[in-house]
Image: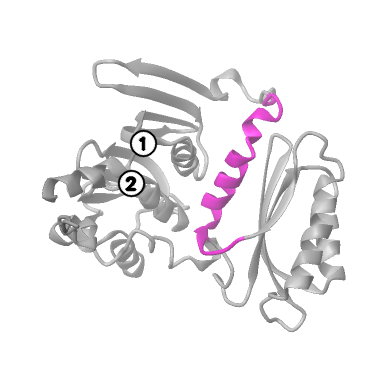
Amino acid sequence: MAKVCWPYFDPEYENFSNRMNPPRVSVDNASCHDCTLIKIDSVNKPGILLEVVQILTDLDFVITKAYISSDGGWFMDVFHVTDQQGKKITDSKTIDLIEKALGPKSKSTEGVKNWPSKHVGVHSVGDYTAIELIGRDRPGLLSEISAVLANLHFNVFAAEVWTHNRRIACVLYVNDATNQVADDPKRLSLMEEQLNNILRGCDGEKVARTSFSMGSTHMDRRLHQMLFADRDYESYAVAREVDSPPSLRPRITIERCEEKGYSVVSVKCKDRAKLMFDIVCTLTDMQYVVFHATVSSDGPYALQVCYIDIVFCMLIYESCKEEIE
């Protein structure tokens, strides 16, 4: 049989661009009198925009403006940020943390390791097990969930709950009565069964579920994924904000730019914390890539314009492989 030879592909090639062109992060307090400019130049890669916005959000920064450009092989962003009091970021330790989290010393999966409370997963915040719950929301549901855990002698170390369109997504960190990780299969199975019974008690339309999270995932990111997978946006018609003036109600337009091959999504709504993070998460969950974007806020209003398209992100890496094969 003839010997078949294949070209050698170095498994470290995917990191080659990052080593040759490490990310450059600049924290500028001189160019603008009322905010700090964070400038990031880096090799483009799948999910980099979400990673950066996630880190800035976890640091409790307020993003007042942003200019995003990631078309092609390079990622160039400028963020105008303040702290929660509307002041510049001047603390040297915080600036050092920004440079480490976004700069060449960080890795694609390490963007949020400095904020363990944002992680989901077994052992992700010490000896605790993460439980994911999703179902229909109703009065008294959290009380019933707490009663089940108390009766089974589980301690709740931390929890985060989101509700939307009468659906609930919840992540709980629990351990046993001796403050050790809860890993007994029989007890976990019993807890899962009882929690599912509670969640399904009044859920005639959708199947509720309880699951144990394995690995480590960003908390807010995971809750986004859970609700999107649950198709919460189809559950009920979204109630209009009758108490808000028409000017503050969300206005979303989508236009197709045939010349550039993009779709232009424009969102104008009342400004709030984590708005940019939520929009980027939603687009990412829908398999869209943001090539360009502008973000601005003026008083109570926010305007975010994103140039998006559906792209198979791995094509970037596959094309690089083909060049050397």
Instruction: Let me know if residue 34 appears in the view.
Output: no
Instruction: Let me know if residue 299 appears in the view.
Output: yes
Location of residue 101 in the rendering, given as x and y in whole percent from the top left corner: 33, 63
Apparent side of residue 237 relative to residue 260 in the rendered image (left or right): right
Query: Within the magenta stretch, is there residue 229?
Result: yes
For label 1, the SS is strand
Where, quadrant-wise, is the N terminus in this rendering?
bottom left
Apparent side of residue 316 relative to residue 135 in the rendered image (left or right): left
Within-10-Å neighbours for mark 1: few <14, some 14–19, many 20+: many
- Residue at image location 40% in from the left, 44% down from the top: 63
Q: Which residue is at the far front?
A: 1
Which segment did they paint magenta? 213-239
Residue 289 marker: 1
Location of residue 56 in the rendering, given as x and y in whole percent from the top left corner: 40, 53
Apparent side of residue 163 relative to residue 304 in the rendered image (left or right): right
Residue 46 marker: 2
For label 2, the SS is loop
Location of residue 37 in the rendering, given as x and y in whole percent from the top left corner: 28, 49
**Do tag 2 and tag 1 residues touch (Cβ < 8 Å)?**
yes
Location of residue 125 in the rendering, given as x and y in whole percent from the top left corner: 56, 71
